[in-house]
Image (spheres, helix red, strand yellow):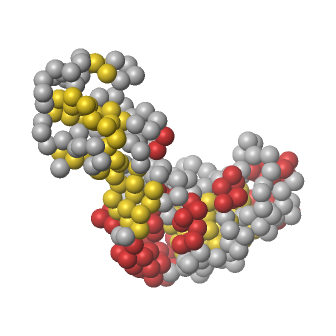
């Protein structure tokens, strides 16, 4: 059983290079499932972009090569018992975050997270200087301001928001911006700070035509019975010669699930394939009617966001 991600390597490398050229100074993000590639795989590519790399949380720091400096995007929180590397740059968005680091006796360098219209983590910009001073008095080197913009809106609105926030921040520290895209040049022209674009999805994924996600067909059988699966699900039109069960080699263990609207993510010969049951661990059962159905050894297309799946194999073409 295999969930396989194929990558058109030439087009992909060109895309990554073009993004870096467009954005200027970049902090590559390698977090979570590694955008479908796996974090270990992407680290080698991130090293060609910058010496620094951003990871999702402190648990992911252990996967960063020793010759790269990790930036941790999420505040540490109380579930962490130690910081695995002294050079890891941690995120602080409140005095409570500083208290957590003090309890851990972690004197790591930090970035100050400033609140945006995302309204997730971060200190109000009017209190950012005070939090910076508190961090420095606690023994932390403050290396940057951090602004995480929302995805909503357009380049103009995001650039305007970033510029407005930056205007309230001391310019002796660089600003790390997320979700700014090519509009970062407008921000750079409006502020005196050094601006670094923090990017993951756009940098690594870009144009979806570069990728293919497929799962292999392990077994098929005619539906000569009325129900099947973990929950004895009734098979539509069971007993006719045209209905077959098709077992596909991926499931919830790979992060594969129904689409947000409940439809099946599986396709073959430009037709969506009906799921008998939701994907389970390493297998999904499909109920397929008609002669144009996948056979054992075929590959079916899988429609899933690469930011959440765990392919078994990555093939570079």
Residue appearing at x 68%, y 68% in the figure: 65
Residue 215 shows up from this direction: yes
Residue appearing at x 34%, y 52% in the figure: 214
Residue 262 shows up from this direction: no
- Report the front residue among 224 and 6: 224
Quarter of the image holding residue 113? bottom right
Report the number of numbered marks: 0
Q: In which quadrant is the N terminus drawn?
A: top left
Q: Is residue 152 above or below residue 172?
A: above
- Report the front residue among 14 and 1: 1
Q: Is residue 77 above or below residue 226?
A: below
Q: In this view, does 282 lie to the left or right of 40?
A: left
Residue appearing at x 30%, y 48% in the figure: 297
Quarter of the image holding residue 41? bottom right
Q: Where is residue 69 in the image (x, y as percent from the top left)?
A: 69, 70
Q: In this view, does 215 lie to the left or right of 39?
A: left
Residue appearing at x 41%, y 48% in the figure: 2
- Report the front residue among 226 and 22: 226
């Amino acid at each position: 059983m295999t969930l396989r991600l194929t990558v058109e390597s030439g087009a992909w490398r060109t895309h990554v290079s073009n993004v870096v050229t467009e954005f200027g100074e970049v902090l590559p993000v390698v977090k979570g499932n590694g955008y479908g590639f796996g974090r270990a795989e992407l680290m080698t590519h991130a090293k060609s972009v910058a010496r620094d790399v951003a990871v999702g949380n402190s648990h992911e720091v252990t996967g960063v090569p020793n010759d790269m400096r990790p930036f941790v995007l999420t505040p540490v929180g109380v579930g962490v018992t130690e910081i695995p590397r002294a050079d890891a740059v941690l995120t602080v968005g409140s005095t409570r975050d500083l208290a957590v680091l003090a309890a851990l006796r972690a004197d790591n360098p930090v970035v100050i997270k400033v609140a945006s219209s995302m309204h997730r983590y971060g200190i109000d910009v009017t209190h950012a200087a005070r939090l910076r001073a508190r961090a420095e008095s606690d023994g932390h080197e403050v290396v940057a301001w951090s602004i995480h913009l929302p995805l909503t809106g357009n380049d103009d609105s995001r650039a305007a928001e970033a510029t407005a926030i930056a205007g309230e921040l001391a310019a002796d520290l660089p600003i790390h911006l997320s979700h700014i895209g090519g509009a970062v040049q407008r921000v750079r022209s409006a502020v005196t700070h050094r601006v670094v674009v923090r990017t993951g999805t756009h940098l690594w994924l870009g144009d979806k035509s570069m990728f293919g996600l497929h799962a292999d067909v392990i077994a098929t059988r005619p539906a000569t019975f009325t129900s099947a699966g973990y929950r004895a699900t009734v098979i539509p039109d069971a007993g006719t010669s045209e209905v077959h069960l098709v077992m596909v080699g991926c499931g919830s263990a790979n992060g594969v699930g129904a689409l947000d609207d409940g439809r099946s993510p599986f396709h073959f010969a430009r037709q969506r394939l009906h799921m008998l049951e939701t994907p389970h661990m390493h297998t999904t059962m499909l109920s397929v009617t008609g002669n144009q159905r996948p056979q054992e050894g075929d590959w079916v297309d899988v429609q899933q966001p690469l930011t959440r799946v765990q392919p078994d194999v990555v093939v570079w073409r």
